[in-house]
Image: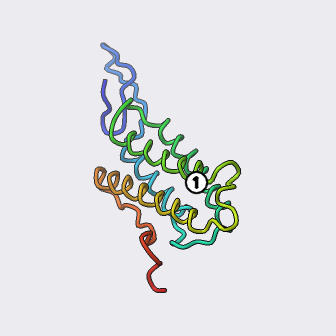
Amino acid sequence: MGDLMGFRPTALSAFGFGVNWEFTKSDRVIAQKVLDFLTDKRVLTVGHVRPQVEATACLASAAECRAQLSSYLNQLEKPGGDLRTWLRAMREGFTDLIEAGGPGGERFGPGSDSRFNDALAQLRNRIQQQADEVSDRYKLTGLSLPDHEGRPTGF
């Protein structure tokens, strides 16, 4: 039995004309929650050219995003689908940032401003691309991440 407007019938009775319903989350609802969640994450919202001293906070933010995306993936009922693919790609982006930082973030230690900012720019590009796909597909307001190609505007 398929979903009908966010509800899935779980049982039918022949003579009692009864139907039991179970509420299900649609992919669109989950997509909106993902975009809302990512909107204010430090690792995505800090501008370009961040000092290395912010690396620890950004890595913690990336770890939180990775865990939350896993939670959203667990809420998807379809085994395949575009949203699952996009959320996996986002989660992989956060994982790549964490891996780039090395154990305990040591590769983003003192003197690593350029390496740290390059990794942030790669993450933002990847997340922005996936978020654009999600927002286009589900007709949602997308993410508008800070300028990650150069210095922030207004400076």
Residue in front for this viewpoint, 31 or 133: 133
Q: Give the answer, above or below, for where 95 lies relative to 39.
A: above
Please tell me which residue is depicted at 40% across the width and 49% down the height of the picture: 31
Residue in front for this viewpoint, 63 or 137: 63
Residue 145, image quadrant: bottom left
> How far across and down, in percent of the image, does residue 125 sit?
41, 60
Query: Considering the image in quadrants, where does the N terminus appear?
Result: top left
Residue 110, image quadrant: bottom right
Please tell me which residue is depicted at 71% across the width and 51% down the height of the picture: 104
Please tell me which residue is depicted at 38% across the width and 40% down the height of the picture: 85
Residue 4, image quadrant: top left
Q: Secondary structure at mark 1?
A: helix
Q: Give the answer, above or below, for where 81 lies relative to 62.
A: above
Residue placed furthest toward the top: 15
Left or right for 143, reference 40 = left
Left or right for 20, reference 48 = left
Residue in front for this viewpoint, 100 or 47: 100
Q: Give the answer, above or below, for where 86 lies relative to 11.
A: below
Residue placed furthest toward the bottom: 155
> How far across and down, in percent of the image, does residue 24 sit?
41, 36
Q: Which residue is mark 1?
A: 62
Residue in front for this viewpoint, 72 or 46: 46
Please tell me which residue is depicted at 49% across the width and 57% down the height of the picture: 38
Q: Give the answer, above or below, for where 110 lies relative to 33.
A: below
Question: Which color mode does the image show?
Answer: rainbow
> How far across and down, in percent of the image, does residue 134 sit?
35, 51
Number of marks in the rendered image: 1
Q: Amino acid at mark 1?
A: Ala
Residue placed furthest toward the front: 111
Classify 10 Å Cα crowding around label 1: few (below 14), some (14-19), many (20 and above).
many
